[in-house]
Image (tube, helix red, strand yellow):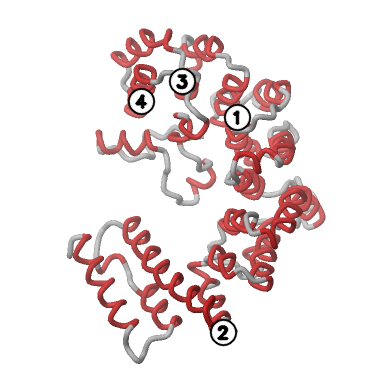
């Protein structure tokens, strides 16, 4: 099997030659790109998928540049069709076209995503993972679409709740929106630039308050932990009593579960409570949540806890916790002050819910990956979100 550089060069040259031939069309070259299969070239699926995206970007750039120069309607329709290929939806490309009808396609698909996975499945949306909401965020920075994007995100969660209640298939179902719907709305909002993001703080707070309540189902409660982490990036502050409710009432029988640990981390950060995190870390009963307490101490830059963490490292056997301790100790030794939001250690700990992992998504937890590299163990054995 060819090494990575060889297969990349080979495919790039094939595509370049084809793009200069008489047979070339944008549809045909994307058929070629999407037709390449990684087992024929490499064992590394992720690297191959990234390479294919890079090649796609080259020819999307070329097509969009040509459209901007010619304003050829047929070419625009071709770009739209390619961008909406079932296995490779590229809503970002439609946004880049910068015209109202392309934007309306994105807006409609975004609204359809809010209706939940049953609707998506029943209406032929294959492999729809919510990327449409993140791509819609791009349109916020196009002035002709900004008002529409603001309106969409201000009403998105209420729309999702109303649709879920009115369209539940059986009376015994809760009528809650899908946990992935709630989480994706909140995550997409955080992709805005800081000042713009702050305008939507109340939306994210409302989503968290709903998802963390004890009346919600377990999967929605799970998602609330990931939303709790997002609360820490806003200047506006949520009422700490809401976090306490999630920890003590919703989480009363789930103290070993990740969503409770994530909420504890967020409470420690928002309250600047390194003493609380350190106290939690000193009780062996809390071992399942140790990782979040260690990370909180690093993100609060509590250097006084370094001796304790160094002692803990010498005695620790769990390979993932060892990686977390190594990172925390390194940060506490080198950080001058509390890190900026985007540089916090917590973001290395993964953003996929247990449900997403169970559905086959590869772990995005850096500490798990480091532990795998050091030990060769499967991430099923040592995972930090193993609820």
Badge 1 is on which residue? Answer: 232
Name the image quarter holding residue 330: top left
Q: What's the CA distance linking mark 1 and mark 2?
A: 46 Å
Q: How dense is the environment of label 1, judged by Cα within 10 Å: few (below 14), some, or many (20 and up)?
A: some
Q: Is residue 361 visible?
A: yes
Residue 151 numbered tag: none
User: Which badge, 2 or 3, is on the more N-terminal residue?
Assistant: 2
Residue 327 numbered tag: 4
Q: What's the CA distance linking mark 1 and mark 3?
A: 19 Å
Q: What's the CA distance linking mark 4 and mark 2?
A: 53 Å
Residue found farthest to the bottom: 22
Q: What's the CA distance linking mark 2 and mark 3?
A: 59 Å
Quadrant of the rendering where the N terminus is positioned = bottom left
- Element class at badge 1: loop
User: From the viewer's perspective, is 177 left or right of 291?
Assistant: right
Viewer-proximal residue among 177 and 145? 145
Q: Residue at x 41, y 18 (%)?
A: 336
User: Which badge, 1 or 4, is on the more N-terminal residue?
Assistant: 1
Q: How dense is the environment of label 2, judged by Cα within 10 Å: few (below 14), some, or many (20 and up)?
A: few
Marks 1/4 in contact by CB < 8 Å: the verdict is no
User: Which badge, 1 or 3, is on the more N-terminal residue?
Assistant: 1
Badge 3 is on which residue? Answer: 290
Q: What's the CA distance linking mark 1 and mark 4?
A: 20 Å
User: From the viewer's perspective, is 329 left or right of 291?
Assistant: left
Q: Residue at x 33, y 23 (%)?
A: 326
Marks 2/3 in contact by CB < 8 Å: the verdict is no
Name the image quarter holding residue 95: bottom right
Badge 2 is on which residue? Answer: 72
- Element class at badge 2: loop
């Amino acid at each position: 099997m060819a090494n990575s550089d060889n297969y990349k060069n080979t495919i790039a040259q094939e595509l370049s030659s084809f793009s200069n031939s008489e047979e070339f069309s944008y549809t045909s070259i994307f058929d070629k790109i999407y037709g390449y299969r990684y087992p024929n070239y490499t064992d590394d699926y992720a690297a191959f998928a990234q390479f294919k995206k890079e090649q796609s970007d080259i020819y999307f750039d070329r097509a969009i540049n040509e459209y901007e120069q010619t304003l050829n309607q047929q070419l625009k329709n071709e770009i739209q069709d390619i961008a909406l290929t079932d296995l490779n939806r590229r809503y970002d490309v439609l946004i880049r076209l910068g015209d109202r009808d392309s934007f309306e396609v994105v807006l409609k698909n975004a609204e359809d995503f809010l209706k939940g996975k049953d609707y998506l499945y029943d209406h032929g949306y294959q492999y729809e993972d919510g990327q449409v909401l993140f791509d819609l965020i791009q349109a916020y920075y196009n002035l002709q679409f900004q008002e529409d994007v603001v309106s969409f995100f201000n009403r998105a969660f209420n729309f999702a709740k109303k649709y879920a209640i009115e369209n539940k298939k059986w009376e015994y179902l809760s009528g809650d929106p899908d946990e992935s719907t709630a989480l994706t709305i909140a995550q997409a909002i955080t992709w805005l630039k800081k000042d713009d993001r702050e305008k939507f703080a109340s939306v994210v707070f409302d989503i968290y308050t709903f998802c963390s309540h004890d009346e919600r189902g377990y999967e929605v409660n799970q998602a609330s932990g990931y939303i709790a982490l997002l609360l820490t990036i806003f200047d506006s502050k949520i009422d700490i009593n809401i976090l306490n409710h999630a920890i003590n009432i919703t989480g009363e029988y789930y103290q070993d579960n990740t969503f409770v640990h994530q909420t504890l981390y967020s409470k420690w950060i928002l309250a600047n409570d390194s003493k609380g995190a350190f106290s939690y870390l000193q009780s062996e009963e809390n071992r399942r949540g140790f990782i979040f307490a260690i990370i909180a101490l690093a993100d609060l830059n509590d250097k006084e806890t370094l001796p304790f963490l160094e002692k803990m490292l010498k005695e620790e056997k769990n390979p993932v916790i060892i990686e977390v301790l190594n990172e925390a100790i390194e940060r506490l030794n080198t950080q001058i002050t509390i890190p900026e939001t985007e540089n916090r250690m917590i973001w290395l700990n993964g953003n996929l819910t247990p449900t997403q992992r169970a559905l086959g998504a590869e772990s995005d937890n850096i500490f798990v990956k480091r532990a795998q590299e050091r030990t060769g163990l499967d991430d099923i054995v040592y995972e930090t979100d193993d609820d």
